[in-house]
Amino acid sequence: MRNRNGIFWGIFLVLSAAILVVSQMHLITYSFSFWTVAVTIFLAAVLIKSLVYFSIPGTVFSLAFLAILYAKPLGITAIVPWTLLGAALLVSIGLSMIFRPLIAKHHPWMNYSKGYTRGHHGPFVQMDYTAKPDVKTVNDPDVNVYVKMGSSIRYVKSEDFNSADINVSMGDAKVYFDNVKIKDSATINVDVSFGGAELFVPSDWIIRQGIDTNMGTITEVGNVRTDEDSPEITITGRVSVGSLKINYI
């Protein structure tokens, strides 16, 4: 995984430098604004990372957004953005169906299927993994959950729970906190992108949210029963093109 990250950042930095130099030297007749260059660098990063991690949807959609961004110099202004995005969706699903057996054979850690749904606040991607999830019990006051292109289930046990850091990228995670004790307060930080995270917490927890959402959804399920002795838990972080579900149990 570290080798892949090195490849990604190496290519990304070289490409970013090339884009900046070319944009300033006016080697291309079409002029680009600062924000066009910035968005191009971001989409290029997504494209490179998708290629490095064999992500068909990431590759197709980053190319689609680049085509929308450069529709004028490419001479495709007659094609409306929604047409390109619709075509990207169909191509993404089609290529995933074609190459899934090959990916599953040579990269079993990427064995998953994708479903597309719509949340209350906009569209997002909900991953539905066919591979067996990684299940572990964690006995630690400070918990780290990292999921990339996979599925994980964590059962947290602690007599003095303090914090949890949950990072989900193109995967899904379920974290159970029903067997932890909190003296006063605790913090849970989430970073979800192109995936989903579910938190299972005691119904007597007082949850304070400070989460940024970008085309993502946050839902709460269950009945809350708090009193003056209830611990206070702050959930921070971000949900980008994904979902966070808090289950009170």
Image (tube, rainbow, N blue to C red):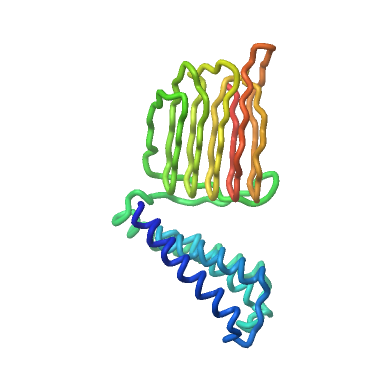
Residue in front for this viewpoint, 169 or 93: 169
Q: Position of residue 98 (x, y in %)?
A: 40, 63
Residue in front for this viewpoint, 52 or 151: 52
**At x 57% / y 29%, what residue is drawn?**
187
**At x 33% / y 54%, what residue is drawn?**
104
Q: Position of residue 65 (x, y in %)?
A: 60, 67
Residue 218 to residue 94: above or below = above
Outermost residue, left side:
106
Q: Position of residue 21 (x, y in %)?
A: 54, 77
Rendering quarter of residue 89: bottom right
Residue 242 to residue 155: above or below = below
**At x 65% / y 50%, what residue is drawn?**
214
Determine whether, in the image, residue 145 is placed left or right of residue 82. left
Determine whether, in the image, residue 10 is placed left or right of residue 207. left
The quarter of the rendered structure image containing the C terminus is: top right
Rendering quarter of residue 42: bottom right
**At x 54% / y 27%, what residue is drawn?**
200
Q: Tell me how many marks there are.
A: 0
Residue in front for this viewpoint, 150 or 94: 150
Q: Position of residue 94 (x, y in %)?
A: 47, 63
Q: Is residue 28 visible?
A: yes
Q: Is residue 92 visible?
A: no
Residue 152 to residue 68: above or below = above
Determine whether, in the image, residue 140 is placed left or right of residue 198. left
